[in-house]
Image (cartoon, helix red, strand yellow):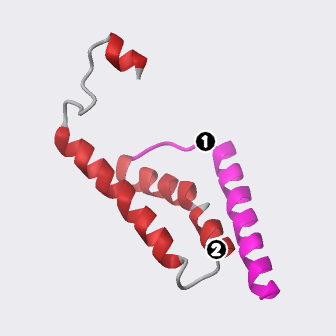
């Protein structure tokens, strides 16, 4: 905040359309997450939400043609397996 005030940058931004789109694309997942709590357990919903960076990476590769290093694939795989393991644990716990 002090940086914005010091450099006289508007809090509303210069590109209002992008700001509105970002707020909408941030609001939709939040609303869907809270709606999912109605149908599945909170632990499962949170676990599924933790997979979001993996999906963001896949979309960035497909749409933005991003390059991902092999070590990053290793860590994405480990993260994905950890979330799946947790979900399976929760399913068998119920």
In the foreground, 61 or 45: 45
Q: Secondary structure at mark 1?
A: loop
Q: Quadrant of residue 4?
A: top left
Query: Which residue position is annotated with label 2?
Result: 42
The answer to if 6 sits in the magenta stretch is no
Q: Position of residue 27 (x, y in %)?
A: 37, 59
Which image quarter holds the N terminus?
top left
In the foreground, 42 or 51: 42
The answer to if 74 sits in the magenta stretch is yes
> Which label is found at residue 69?
1
User: What residue lies at 27% left-to-right and 20% top-to-bottom?
Assistant: 9
Q: Position of residue 75 (x, y in %)?
A: 70, 50
Quick one: which residue is furthest to the top in this view? 6
Q: Is residue 3 left or right of residue 93?
A: left
64, above or below 54, in the image = above
Q: Secondary structure at mark 2?
A: helix
Which image quarter holds the C terminus?
bottom right
43, above or below 14, in the image = below
Count of marks overlaid on the render: 2
Label 2 Cα crowd, 10 Å radius (few <14 / some 14-19 / many 20+): some
Q: Which residues are magenta?
A: 65-94
């Amino acid at each position: 905040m002090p940086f914005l005030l010091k450099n006289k940058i508007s809090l509303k931004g210069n590109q209002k359309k992008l700001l509105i789109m970002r707020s909408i694309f941030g609001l939709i997942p939040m609303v869907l997450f809270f709606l999912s709590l109605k149908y599945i357990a909170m632990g499962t919903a949170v676990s599924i939400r933790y997979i979001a960076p993996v999906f963001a990476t896949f979309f960035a590769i497909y749409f933005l043609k991003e390059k991902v290093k092999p070590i990053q694939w290793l860590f994405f795989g480990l993260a994905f397996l950890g979330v799946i393991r947790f979900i399976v644990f929760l399913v068998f716990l119920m």
